[in-house]
Image: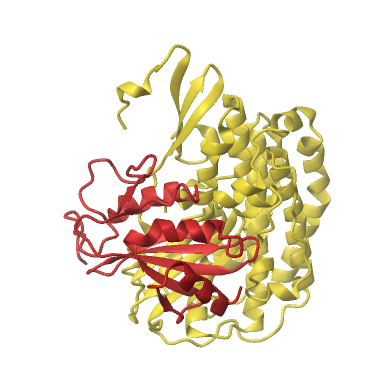
Amino acid sequence: MTKEELKDSFTQIFPAVTFDESGEFLTAIIPSEELLPVMNVLRTKPELYFDYLFCETCVDWKDHLMMVYFLNSRTYNHTLVVKAKITDTINPQIESVFHIWPTAELNEDEIFDLFGVKFLNHPNLRRLFLEEDWVGFPLRKNYVDEHMIEL
Amino acid sequence: MILGEEDYITEEGEFVVNMGPQHPSTHGVLRLKVWLDGETIKKVEPHLGYIHRSIEKMSESLSYRQYGYLTSRMDYLSAHINNLACALVVEKALQVEVPARAQAIRIIIGELTRIGSHLLWFASAGLDLGGVTPFFYAFREREAINSIMDENCGARLTQNFMVPGGIVYDVRPDFQSRVKEVLKQFKDNFHEYNEILTGNVIFQNRLKDVGILTKEDAIAFGCTGPTARASGLSCDIRKMYPYDGYEKLQFDEVISTGCDSWARYEVRMAEMLQSVRIIEQLIDNIPEGDIVAKTKNVIKLPKGEFYQRVETARGELGVYIVSDGGASPYRCKYRSPNFANLSAIPHIARGYKIGDLIAIMATIDLIIPDIDR
């Protein structure tokens, strides 16, 4: 599907979407509460069939967190980036997409570890890299490491 | 880590074993927590973080000339290709035209890296499964490749040769003859590899029908590289999204539909010969000219988001840069091939014997610093 066709089908699934076409891939921005139903349709709808989640990450924009999902369809080879905006930075949470793409399990563990985003309905949410009692989330912009020496 | 109560025997006959972080077959510091029923694996859970350096966080305070140097410490066997990904994403953002000479040398060095990496995999796979001799065979050729790296890039392991716009130095005058020498040595000796491992019945029986990864699972778990191609999934980035002039070269994407550990072995063996084929097409046709395109001293990327992927020896490496217009990345994310391949191991290993887990780990070929980053 071309970018225009993808845009049309996405608008049918979720009309209140905003698109960003400045980058290489078509980017759709949705609120974090709507993530799971939208992702389910993207995965199962036969003409979209996004079966491959090739990158999942998070970006800290200080006033909000942005979850980024890179989706690709191995059948049609079209790519779409879905971004979910989390406005609550104190206690951020979002639905896990593990049940749609199993590769998300470790990715979400990593994001929980480094950004502190809590994934609901995740089978085994744990700190992947850091110790269990580590204070703070290192990839957040407001993270302060007391041991760090400014040069 | 402290072992909790649940880590001892849970039911009669079921117990928990920690494989790693010092287990030789984990090739680094990966700990697999394995739930066993007798010798049969019931569940595997990877525990990471023993070599976590937070390269992504460090990149946020480095310039676009510096941040790539950290990536040769990620997948240290594909150091050149990791650097290349970092260089390509800057070139894509700035729309820099890379000189043809730099592109050709980049491909030759990249493919030599791939052969060297697969050779080390061959050596360690043989070692994990009980054969010591393949290690010496493979290291003989890897040594020759490492010498070329040493002569041209100044390092044998954590090389830093690719920079935004091209390469950092020109190659030495004897580069072509040295590469040809090494390729000849490799091709002459390749039959020995087949004799000692490929034709070995014990080795075959350890791998055949062990660790089945279906094509659907390979997609669902995000597997790439030889691991996914052994499951019949066409996923070579060099073919799908060519970079640096791979589209002009003749080579085959090696795909097998075996889905088991043996198929993964065969795919890697065949890939080495394809890399030789790529180098042979280029080695006599390296164009003359500049080795690096002109870029500003302080590189600043335009505001926006950039994603670049390359095919490392283990699969698709993606670099995702979010730029706020400044001199260093606002957010830098590495989509690591090993991280995705690791997530498939708990699924693959279930139901096999503990000895088969070694065979599965050996053929998936994980590099732990790339997972931990």
Give coordinates of residue A58: x percent, y percent. 36, 62
Q: Quadrant of residue B364?
A: top right
Chain seen in yellow: B
Q: Judge whether A49 appears above or below B40 on screen.
A: below
Give coordinates of residue B367: x percent, y percent. 52, 47
Q: Is residue A63 left or right of residue A18?
A: left
Query: Which residue is pictured at 52% across the width and 85% down the height?
Result: B95
Look at the image and tell me in which quarter the N terminus of chain B lies.
top left
Query: Which residue is pictured at 75% across the width and 66% down the height?
Result: B278
Farthest left residue? Answer: A146
Q: Is residue B213 left or right of residue B155?
A: right
Q: Quadrant of residue A33?
A: bottom left
Give coordinates of residue A37: x percent, y percent. 42, 57
Query: Which residue is pictured at 40% across the width and 64% down the height?
Result: A68
Residue B155 appears in the picture as rendered: no
Query: Which residue is pictured at 77% across the width and 65% down the height?
Result: B251
State the residue in front, A138 or B150. A138
- The picture's colour for chain A is red
Residue B182 appears in the picture as rendered: yes
State the residue in front, B216 or A115. B216
